[in-house]
Amino acid sequence: MEELWQRLQRNYRNNSISKEDKILYKKWGQALKHLSINPKYPGLESHDIDELTMKYGIKVWQSYLENKNSKARRMFWVYGPDKQDITIIGLDPHPESKKNGAYNRIELSDLPKN
């Protein structure tokens, strides 16, 4: 996730970013800002995802980057590895919640080491 963020940031600063990546960079940046101040910020709609928590063995949270469109992206994160740290471990379109096993298809980055 860090590599993706750094690439987006570098391309934005160099003015070589695609239109789609620019939208992602701005939405993700805004979500990160809110998350760092208050993980329960109302617009983020942060909540834990039981399926991913069971799959990865650590409580996994989901927050909105956007809502009310067919490709609404979600940011997946965990607390840690240190006290008061939040680590972003995934960025994906929201899975179709009505389909069984939708969260099982999501692959997250390496989890932080304690």
Image (spheres, rainbow, N blue to C red):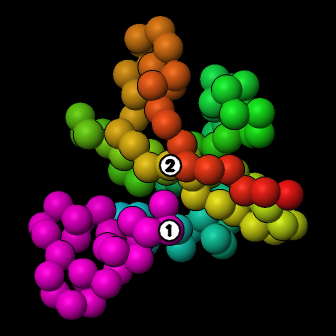
Residue at the disc numbered 2: 90
- State if disc 1 and disc 2 touch (CB < 8 Å): no
Name which residue lies at 16% across and 87% down: 15
Secondary structure mostly seen in the magenta stretch: helix
Name the image quarter holding residue 25.
bottom left
Q: Is residue 4 left or right of residue 37?
A: left
Residue 28 lies, with reference to residue 51, above or below; the image says below
Name the image quarter holding residue 56.
top right
Residue at the disc numbered 1: 2
Residue 97 lies, with reference to residue 24, above or below; the image says above
Residue 89 at what x, y percent from top left? 57, 52
Mark 2 residue type:
Gly
Q: Residues within 10 Å of mark 2 (few under 14, many from 20)?
A: some
Name which residue lies at 45% across and 25% down: 105
Give the extent of the magenta segment. Answer: 1-25
Dot label at residue 93? none
Q: How many marks?
A: 2
Name which residue lies at 65% across and 60% down: 87
Q: Visible in this render: residue 39?
A: yes
